[in-house]
């Protein structure tokens, strides 16, 4: 997000947009679209989904679902970015489930979370694309268990794996030191491997 926008301006835009102010909605989109698109493009590259799901569509779907959420009162940029990661999570999982139904017969494969840090470029390989859809579903299943056992760790995984945020961005969003984010990410990966192996 550009530094040209003050915290107060962003919060005001989000709040007015959630009340149906079209001009504020357009301004909020202008503020967040580039950042969300960068995250979506990185996320789709990691999952090999570029051939079947466009970053612009993912961003637009996530943004407009968020901004039109009837029961959400936006307090600040931080809250919006956390919700955006959750919405991208939901959309990616829905997309992966749809692709699985189309391909029938694929099970959830074991997942190596090291792939999250150094993902393969799967854009041109349909078999690897399918494996990456399965990886999304496998991590989503393990995430549901992590959310029950340790919600703060699950939030970091959601921001990192599904939201595509860097450690520095997560630290800024959650207002905790980057070293804390990294240590919690390491703990979360160890816990998730128990459910993914």
Image (cartoon, rainbow, N blue to C red):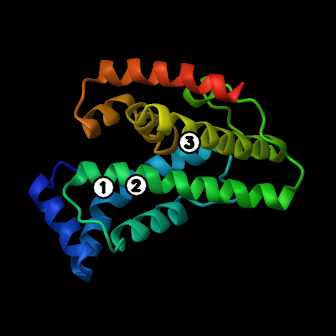
The mark that comes first in sequence, 1 or 3, is: 1
Mark 1 lies on residue: 80
Q: Is residue 192 visible?
A: yes
Residues at marks 2 and 3, CA–CA distance in whole angstroms: 18 Å
- State the image coordinates of residue 155 (x, y, percent, origin top left): 41, 38
Considering the numbered disc 1 on the image, is that residue within a helix, a strand or a loop?
A: helix
Return the residue nearer the eye: 116 or 34. Answer: 116
Question: Which is closer to the viewer, label 1 or label 3?
Answer: 3
Instruction: State if disc 3 and disc 1 touch (CB < 8 Å).
Output: no
Task: In the rendered view, tell whether residue 46 sits above or below residue 25.
Answer: above
Q: Residues within 10 Å of mark 2 (few under 14, many from 20)?
A: many
The residue under the point 34% across, 69% down is 67
Mark 2 lies on residue: 84
Q: Residues within 10 Å of mark 1 (few under 14, many from 20)?
A: many
Q: Which mark is residue 144?
A: 3
Instruction: State if disc 3 and disc 2 touch (CB < 8 Å).
Output: no
Residues at marks 1 and 3, CA–CA distance in whole angstroms: 21 Å
The mark that comes first in sequence, 2 or 3, is: 2
The residue under the point 49% across, 25% down is 188
Does residue 96 appear to the left or right of 130 in the view shown?
left
Determine the image quadrant of residue 74.
Answer: bottom left
The residue under the point 63% across, 31% down is 119
Considering the numbered disc 2 on the image, is that residue within a helix, a strand or a loop?
A: helix
- State the image coordinates of residue 54 (x, y, percent, origin top left): 59, 61
Return the residue nearer the eye: 19 or 149. Answer: 149
- State the image coordinates of residue 85 (x, y, percent, origin top left): 43, 49
Instruction: State if disc 1 and disc 2 touch (CB < 8 Å).
Output: yes
């Amino acid at each position: 997000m550009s530094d040209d926008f003050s915290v107060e301006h962003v919060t005001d835009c989000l709040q007015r947009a959630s009340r149906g102010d079209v001009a504020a909605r357009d301004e909020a989109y202008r503020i967040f679209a580039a950042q969300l698109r960068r995250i979506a493009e990185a996320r789709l590259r990691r999952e090999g989904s570029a051939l079947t799901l466009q970053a612009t569509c993912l961003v637009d779907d996530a943004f407009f679902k968020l901004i039109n959420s009837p029961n959400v009162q936006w307090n600040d940029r931080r809250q919006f970015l956390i919700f955006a990661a959750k919405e991208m999570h939901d959309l990616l999982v829905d997309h992966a489930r749809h692709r699985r139904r189309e391909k029938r017969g694929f099970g959830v494969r074991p997942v190596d979370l090291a792939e999250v840090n150094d993902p393969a470029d799967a854009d041109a390989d349909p078999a690897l694309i399918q494996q990456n859809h399965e990886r999304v579903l496998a991590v989503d299943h393990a995430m549901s268990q992590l959310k029950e056992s340790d919600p703060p760790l699950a939030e970091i995984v959601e921001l990192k794996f599904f939201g595509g945020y860097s450690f520095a961005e997560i630290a800024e969003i959650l207002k905790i030191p980057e070293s804390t984010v990294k240590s919690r990410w390491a703990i979360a990966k160890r816990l998730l491997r128990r459910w993914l192996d």
